[in-house]
Each structure stands twice: as C-alpha cells, then as structure tokens.
Image (cartoon, helix red, strand yellow):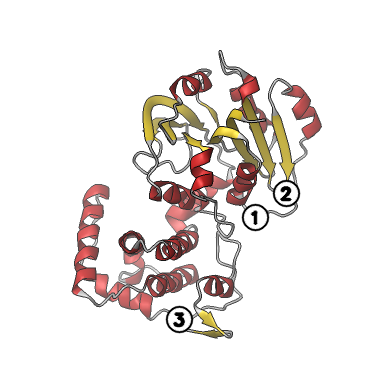
C-alpha cells in the first residue's frame, strides 16, 4: 500500500536515546495523519547496540515502522539505498539517527506544500553545533538533508547511492539529483535539526576531514565515480568542471604541505595517486591552454568566495606532482570506501589482464 511519505533512518551502534530523539520528533508532529507515513529504520549490522527493537516498535506503535537489519556493514549510503528499495512513499526524506525534525509542524507543512509539479521540496536545516540555519539543496550545502524528494523522480532516473562509498555518499547522491534537473520548491521553513553529538561518526569524520584530510580519499573517489557516470552520459563539460573543482580544493588545502615546510603524510601521497586516476579517467588534456585558463578562472572564483590566499603560479607544478605520483599497493583499502585500489581500477577499466595501464 502506497504512502504519502517515507522517512528513512540508517543506524549503526546507536544508543536508544539517539533513536528516541529521532522517533520522538516524528510522533510529536501536529495535525498529521500518520496512516500516510511509513518509517524505515535500517540497522547497518550493529555490533554493540543493546536496543530491544521489539520494545521500540511497541513504544511507537502509533507509527508505521519497518525495522531491517543488514547482514554486512557497508556504510550509511548502502543502508539508505536499502531503505529506498523497500519504500512505498510518494516522497522520501532522509533522517540520520540522533537528528530530528525541527518542530511539530514539519509534516503538516509538507502535506500542504507537496504538489504534482515538484520533484524536490527544499527547506532550511538547523545546525545545533553552530546554532545556525541554512538552505538545503538550493545552494549545494546540505547534501541530502532537509529535502523531500519525489520517489518517482529517483526511480525514473535510476538514481542510487553508490555501494562503494562510505563517506561522501550523500554528496554523490545529491550530484545525481542535480544532474537530472529536478523541479524544486524552496521553502523558508526549517524541517531538519542536525543535532550536535561529539561522539558521532559524522562529527569525528568532519574534524579529521578538515584537519587531517581523512575524507579526501573518499571525496576524490566520489569525483572519479561521477566522472565515470558523466562519461557514459557524454556530459563532458560537467565532468571537466568536477575535475577542476576537486583539483582546486586539494591544491588550496595541500599547498602548505607540498610547497611549504609542513610534512607530506602517507595519507596525502595516497590522495595524490587518486587524483592521478581522476585525471586519467577524465581524459583531460592538462597541458592545454584552455584547461589552464579554466583552472585559474575557477581558482580565482573559489579564493574570492572562501577568502583563500595561495599563489596561482604553483598550480602547474601541483598538476605535475599529481601526474607523477607513485603507484600504490593495489590491495590497499581506500579510506572512506568499501573498495581497494585494484578494485577501483577494474571498475574504471584502468586495468587489462591484471596489468596496470599507468
């Protein structure tokens, strides 16, 4: 039986308090017919959780909750995809365990605003950690959170989470949403509350991403997979823009290490090698004047927007460092993913008879 809305909640080794935080925010919704709602909780093969899910389902009997436990841990993207595959809502909404609907009016507003003329309803997202609100989706800054997505749009365009990504999986999914040009309604209302939790995997990953480059490997792999998709779609300009975006980000962040006095870590060597794969997969002529001009133009725009201050003249040397990066152990698992270097190269068609093309 179809529903008006499916809320998909992945969970992994979460406490009962975090689960209740999310479910309480749903059951407190005012003036909403819960018979039109289904909630799918996907347990990504928790190993330490002591939650009695039979008791949870009894406690929230008013809600139509499906609980699914996966046999193997593959990360939140895969868990959300399982939720999508088992959903029947006209719209879907992703809610991470421990986060919550912003107030008791969210579903009431959704029910009033949904129309047959939109594919995505974008709202604001409240970040409890920094006590601020921001628009979701419209300005590419909240990934998949705070948006109601028409499930038919997802299905018709075969948009899926990538099974290989553990981090950056939401950004990958969002880029596919954008590629197919959804009809978007943007509301000033806030629907999503990103609740601060110092022990959460997301918060830890974000800190490491910023300070120790922990998420950069997954970010580059995400871009490689996107370029693979764009190549099949013959969306070459989109692919070039993605490559340049990642190159600029890495150049700006790595500059003090590559051309300054800070040490280059083993993690950074791996990222440079993955960037080399990105260049090979995209087939961009990095020696062309057109590429260099576009690279410098985009870099200038980024530095103005984000107030960065690194010199332009070392960009060419940075590209050469990437292209000359040493091969890695093919059996090395890529951080933030479910695949090794060798497996990635096979997926991309960069290996032939077990002999590397590069």
Q: Which mark is residue 74?
A: 1
* Residue 183 x/y as whole percent: 38, 37
Q: Give me the C-alpha separation between circle 2 and circle 1.
A: 9 Å
Element under disc 3: loop
Element under disc 1: loop
Q: Quadrant of residue 38?
A: top right
Q: Nearer the viewer, residue 141 or 269?
A: 141
Whichever of labels 3 and 2 marks the residue nearer the N terminus, that label is 2
Q: Nearer the viewer, residue 157 or 264?
A: 157
Q: Which mark is residue 120?
A: none
Compared to residue 247, the image places residue 122 above or below, namely above
* Residue 76 x/y as whole percent: 60, 48
Element under disc 2: loop
Q: Which mark is residue 326?
A: 3
Q: Residue at horizontal 26%, vertical 53%?
A: 302
Residues under numbered marks 2 and 1 in contact, where contact means CB atoms less than 8 Å apart:
yes
Can residue 311 be seen by looking at this rendering?
no
Q: Residue at horizontal 49%, vertical 37%?
A: 149
For the N terminus, give its image quadrant.
Answer: top right
Q: Residues within 10 Å of mark 2 (few under 14, many from 20)?
A: some
Can residue 3 be seen by looking at this rendering?
yes
Q: Give me the C-alpha separation between circle 3 and circle 2.
A: 38 Å
Q: Residues within 10 Å of mark 1 (few under 14, many from 20)?
A: some
Compared to residue 98, the image places residue 60 above or below, namely above
Q: Give me the C-alpha separation between circle 1 and circle 3.
A: 29 Å
Q: Which mark is residue 70?
A: 2
**Circle 3 or circle 2, nearest the eye:** 2
**Circle 1 or circle 3, nearest the eye:** 1
């Amino acid at each position: 039986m179809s529903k008006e809305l499916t809320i998909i909640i992945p969970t992994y080794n979460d406490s009962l308090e975090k689960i209740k935080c999310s479910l309480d925010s749903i059951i407190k919704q005012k003036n909403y017919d819960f018979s039109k709602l289904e909630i799918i909780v996907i347990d990504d093969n928790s190993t330490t959780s002591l939650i009695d899910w039979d008791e949870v389902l009894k406690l929230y009997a008013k809600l139509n909750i499906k609980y699914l436990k996966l046999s193997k841990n593959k990360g939140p993207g895969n868990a959300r995809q399982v939720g999508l595959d088992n959903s029947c809502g006209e719209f879907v909404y992703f809610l991470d365990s421990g986060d919550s609907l912003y107030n008791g009016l969210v579903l009431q507003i959704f029910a009033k605003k949904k129309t047959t003329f939109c594919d995505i309803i974008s709202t604001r997202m409240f970040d409890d950690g920094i006590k601020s609100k921001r628009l979701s989706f419209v300005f590419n800054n909240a990934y998949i959170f705070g948006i109601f997505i028409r499930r038919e749009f997802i299905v018709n365009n075969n948009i899926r989470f990538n099974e290989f990504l553990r981090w950056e999986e939401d950004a990958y999914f969002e880029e596919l949403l954008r590629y197919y040009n959804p009809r978007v309604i943007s509301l000033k209302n806030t629907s999503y509350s990103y609740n601060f939790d110092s022990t959460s995997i997301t918060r830890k990953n974000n800190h490491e991403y910023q300070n120790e480059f922990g998420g950069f490997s997954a970010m580059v792999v995400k871009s490689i997979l996107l370029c693979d998709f764009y190549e099949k779609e013959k969306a070459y300009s989109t692919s070039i823009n993605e490559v340049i975006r990642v190159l600029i980000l890495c150049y700006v962040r790595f500059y003090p290490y590559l051309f300054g006095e800070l040490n280059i870590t083993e993690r950074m060597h791996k990222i440079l090698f993955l960037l080399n794969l990105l260049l090979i997969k995209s087939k961009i002529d990095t020696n062309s004047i057109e590429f260099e001009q576009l690279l410098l133009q985009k870099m200038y725009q980024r530095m103005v927007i984000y107030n960065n201050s690194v010199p332009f003249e070392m960009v060419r040397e940075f590209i050469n460092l990437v292209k000359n990066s040493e091969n890695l152990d093919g059996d090395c698992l890529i951080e933030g993913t479910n695949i090794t270097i060798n497996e990635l190269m096979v997926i991309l068609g960069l290996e032939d008879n077990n002999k590397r093309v590069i």
